[in-house]
Structures are given as C-alpha cells and as structure tokens.
Image (spheres, helix red, strand yellow):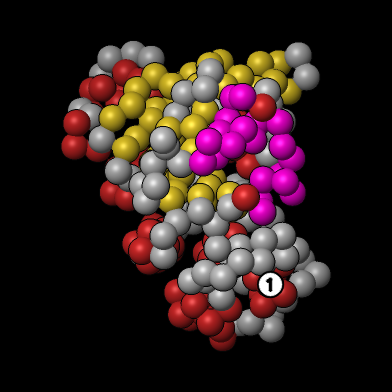
Amino acid sequence: MSLLNTQRLTAHYGDFQALFGVDIALNQGETIAIIGANGAGKTTLMRSLSGVLKNDPDMITLEGRRIGGMSADEVLPLGLAMVPEGRCLFPSLSVEENLLIGAYGRKVEGYWSLATIYDLFPILAERRNNPGTALSGGQQQMVAIGRALMSNPKVLLCDEISLGLAPVVIKDIYAAVPKIQESGASLIVVEQDIGQAMKVADRVYCMMEGQVTLEGTPDNLSRDDIHAAYFGVSA
C-alpha cells in the first residue's frame, strides 16, 4: 500500500472545476515532483491533499485512511504538513515563534526540533529573534520549511519553494532536501523548474489543465515526452 494516494481526484472552486480525475501515489521514503505550467492544477492538488480544499473522502487516502473530506486542522495531526506557496509567515511573530507554531497541531517525538532546524538552516539561529517577514525571501522560505518540519510530518508538501528566488538561493534551499529525506519524511514537491524537479525526485508527474499527462522516473522521461505533456504539443 502506498503512503498517500489520490483516486480519481476532482476539485472545484464554486462552479469551476480545477482537477479532473487525478491519480497519484507516494510511497514511503519517496520524493515525487509535480511539474506543469501555471494553471495546470498543481497548487489545487496540494490544497486538496492538505485539507485546505475538501473533497470526497474516498478520493484521498493516507496510510489507508480516507482523508479527502477532512479539513487542514484534521489532516495535520495525521502527519501531513505543507510549505505553502508564498510562505505565509506570521508577520507579528519572530523567526523562532513562527517555527514553534509548526509543532502546535502535532506534538510527536521525532527528528525535528528547534535545534535540528537551526542545524539545517544556521542563519535562522542567528535571526531567531527577528520578525519572520523581515528576512530575505530565501530566509523566509527556510522558516516556512522549518515550520512545517517542526510537526515531524510523515509527508511534507512543498508548493513552489523556489518561486521568486535567485538561483544561488534556490541551490541553498534544495541542499536541505537530502537531510529532510534522511529524517524519514516522504516529499511531494511542486515545481515549475523542470531541471530542479528532476534532480530531487524519484518519480515525476506532469500536469496540464487539471489532469496528469505523464508519469515516470527522471531517467526514463525524455525531453520531448516532458515537452508534450507540459504544453500539449510535441517539441
């Protein structure tokens, strides 16, 4: 049994349908990447998985448990945490307070603590008393990742964590991924940067117009395959 599954997942914003029968599977210890152009449905998928958008209960399962109809505050204690697009830090809280918020909804023994977050991102230890939103974009992203890790999740959802960051900063952010993997978390990474997605993922799903158009391992997907699945036309 996969750790996390969707079965014919659909999602709506009012009368607008954003997902059309999406099937993905995440195995224990695996990292999968979700790629696709703007509007492909990637963020809607992440919002559905995390409980921000409610769906039919049978459409999403975590360790065999139906979670599609659960809200975000019900999903988090089960071991699923998200690093949201745009970081969404609390501006009135310090770096350390933002991190501690992450452990509020799920208090379990695990690898991640303030000490291990600061070991992963040493700059946050130096800035621990600064307002979270007073940091650079890359440092704020580190806080958002650390906040999610503080719940010691089984599944970590990362939605566009490189968006708007300089290449050198993106490199620093993604340098943390192997350590996160070693801690036992399984990851779903949404990325528009295909090259970056290929570097960290065991498997890749491509989405277009709310549907999965391609799935495979980075070694088995050609540039032409990805181009056709990404844009709907051959290279």
Residue 14, percent from left and from top? 78, 19
Residue 148, percent from left and from top? 59, 60
Residue 171 visible to an observer of this rendering = no
Placement of the N terminus among the 4 image quadrants: top left
Asked if residue 49 lies left or right of residue 133, the reply is: left
Residue drawn at x 39%, y 28% is 206
The three-letter amino acid code for the residue at tag 1 is Leu
The quarter holding residue 53 reads top right
Work out whether residue 168 or residue 202 is closer to the camera in this orientation and state it: 202
Asked if residue 197 lies left or right of residue 104, the reply is: left
Q: How many marks?
A: 1
Q: Is residue 60 magenta?
A: yes
The quarter holding residue 59 reads top right
Residue drawn at x 30%, y 43% is 202
Residue 116 visible to an observer of this rendering = yes
The quarter holding residue 169 reads bottom left
Query: With respect to residue 6, does 84 lie above or below?
Result: below
- Residue that badge 1 annotates: 100
Determine the secondary structure under disc 1.
helix
Residue drawn at x 58%, y 49% is 80
Q: Is residue 191 magenta?
A: no
Query: With respect to residue 193, does 166 lie above or below?
Result: below
Residue 109, percent from left and from top? 56, 70
Placement of the C terminus among the 4 image quadrants: top left
Span highlighted in magenta in the image: 58-77
